[in-house]
Image: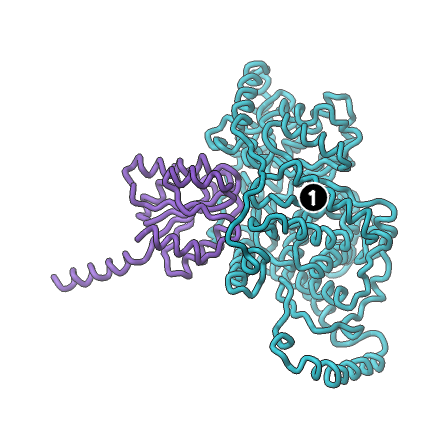
Chain colours: A cyan, B purple
Amino acid sequence: MQETKNYWKVKINEITEKKSTNQDSEDQLKQIKDRIKKWEKDVLEPWTDNSADHNKIYQTTSDINVKNTYTMADVDNLSQNLFPGDFPYTRGPYPNMYRGKKWTMRMFSGFGTPEDTNKRLKYLIENGQTGLSIAFDMPTLYGYDADNKRSIGEVGKCGCNISSLKDMEILFNEIPLRDVSTSMTINAPASILTAMYASVAIKNNIPINELRGTVQTDILKEYIAQKEWTYPPKNHMRIIRDMMEYCTKEMPKWNYISISGYHIREAGSNAVQELAFTLANGFTYLELGKQAGLKIEEFAPRLSFFFNSTMNFFEEIAKFRAARRIWATVLKEKYGVEDNKALILRFHTQTSGASLTWQQPMNNIVRTAIEALAAVLGGTQSLHTNSYDEAWALPTEEAVKVALRTQQIIAEETGVTSTVDPLGGSYYLECLTNELEEGAYRYFDKIEEIGGVINAIEEGYLQKEIAETAYRNQLQIEKEKEIIVGVNKYNETEEKPIKILKVDDKAQEIQIERLKKIKNERNNDRVKETLANLRRTYENDEKNCMYDTLKAVQAYATLQEIVDVGRDVFGEWKEPQIF
Amino acid sequence: MERTANFLRVEKMSEKTKIRILVAKPGLDAHDRGILVLCKALRDAGMDVIYSGLLPTPEQVAKIAIDEDVDAIALSLHNGAHLTAFPEVKKHLEDKGMYNIAVIGGGIIPEEDKKELENKGISGNFGPGTSMETIIDHIKKMVK
């Protein structure tokens, strides 16, 4: 294990030094560099004639300058990244990648009542989807029941509403939990929804140690980007610590944190920021697991990642490759992990919602296809493709089908899955991978100087970095330095409306009715007792709160009743001034 | 003495020409990329910008607007609750007799909802991809 102090600075030096001295033959490098100079002078310059186009500065989203041409002189570490399924996993987590198993096509869905979403899930399974992924509505994400005043107008609007275990039972009705893997996009109340999912399995006599799936749980990126939180960071982290401990023991196939860059990117960051902030969060969860007394070798394989794939094609592919390399390297060098299996970063990808345009929505099919291809070329383990109508509303069944078919076309028709990491060895891509890696290490160093991720959140540093990039990006678009087809170029004066999905307010009525019924039928003394126990556990940092959470859920305490206990004990988070 | 008072009045007048605007997301919606960009753009366009922070209720938004004596409120929602939440803000303003604060909407708003919002006194209702310039011009027009 390396000296951990100044580790990031050591890495930055290592990378920058590598750039100036090539470890392959110095002479050969000099020869190549001479040839490049000659070529630039004799061939390139006369051809471009110093035109404005040629002299324009080309950059990636992360302000990395892009050269006219890349050669072997730009890449010096090919020999250290030869094989997929081998340290540092730049070329892929598995040696045969998609030859062995295609990525999981996992379309995120959820709206209205649990009945509505149950129907959509079954539709997707019938159409060849291989994993479930569930979106919840805002009240659920914030831990408010459907009958709360704050939930008015929001129930079922941008995801499925879950107010109690009853709803979860309906959501998974007739879906074989033993056979499917289920991903649930839930963060602040992740411990409660995990308890609900486990409880549905227990009721159906399925051992919970067989349950496969993922809960997002990544509260750090909530403070940084998505901003769906309840308690202050330290209290949320304690609950996650308890989940890590519980799941490692009781639900060994359950991925209990999906460390997400997706929202960090959607909030307006660039590729380097997405990469750096996400991995920095990952390291923070590693530390948390260590504090809980778990061995990294034991729990690191249960951590998975979730990245965005957006329009700067090569930079995105490089980002995925850099992510694997950094994670494996840091775990090995800084955390002393020896078991190779624990070094592998696996990730889900979603194409970028923010890249979709409201204008000329059919163009979004093309954008999504390009982004999906980047994810596949970057070696993703599962993929969600957005639907073309999502800048208008939640997607219709028809639009979702086109999005799923987009993945199927990439998988079955293009041949890109025939060989592993087909772009590996591309001078440009390898160079970009190195540049993104370096940029990420610079941020790790900066975050450490601030005192770690949680301090950086409390100070608002990470949030401000993202907002600043988002604003600069918007200015680029307004100045037409960045082009978006149909928005600031090739625009049309009138938009033909498309057919969109309407979620009516019936969902709210149905959910409120159901809550009333549950509160009448359940044993209310038992509910009170389980909630009082949970309160005592929340107050005692030494105790694991998962067991009491399960008991409260199974007594049909509602989501909000459980979250309110936490609100009372921990208080609510107030974001620092960002603007 | 009188001179000073006059001078103060002039100061106040020129301050008054500066548009004072509250920017808010009235509901359980944290998609704040657009609204933070908008805050910066409005500030750079010379307005006095007050950002509500996340998760205020419509009632709280109306209260901040009145307390801060703003000329306009820019509301944004991406969660589909605009038809409930935007008119709710307007209603709370009118309950307090504040008819002259311009309420401007934006976010993911389907075409057919725009008319309904307009009828309820919420103008603009800008969708994704709208330029900051368009929004700024509209605000200036509305508070004139």
Chain bearing tag 1 is A
* A5 left or right, relative to A149: right
Q: Quadrant of the N terminus of chain A?
A: bottom right
The residue that appears at 29% across and 44% down in the rendered structure is B100
Judging depth in this view, the residue of A535 and A38 nearest the camera is A38
To which residue does mark 1 refer?
A: A403
- Residue A166, compared with residue A401, is above or below; it is above
As drawn, B8 above or below A218: below
Instruction: Indicate the position of residue A188 as horizontal and vertical percent values.
Output: 59, 38
Is residue A527 among what the camera can see? Answer: yes
A380, above or below B94, in the image: below
Q: Is residue A270 above or below residue A205?
A: below
The residue at the far left in this view is: B2
Which residue lies at the image location 44% right of the left edge and 56% below the top edge?
A: B134
Q: Badge 1: how crowded within 10 Å, few (<14), some, or many (20+)?
A: many
Total labels: the figure holds 1
Whether residue A249 can be seen here: no
Q: Amino acid at mark 1?
A: Ala
Image quarter of residue A444:
bottom right
Q: Position of residue A198 (x, y in %)?
A: 71, 28
Secondary structure under badge 1? helix
Residue at 68% x, 66% y is A9
Q: Which quadrant of the structure image shows residue B99?
A: top left
Taking depth in this image into account, of A79 and A407 the one nearest to the observer is A407
Left-right relation of A259 to B111 = right
- Residue at horizontal 66%, vertical 38%? A398
Q: Picture coordinates of residue B9 (x, y %)?
A: 20, 59
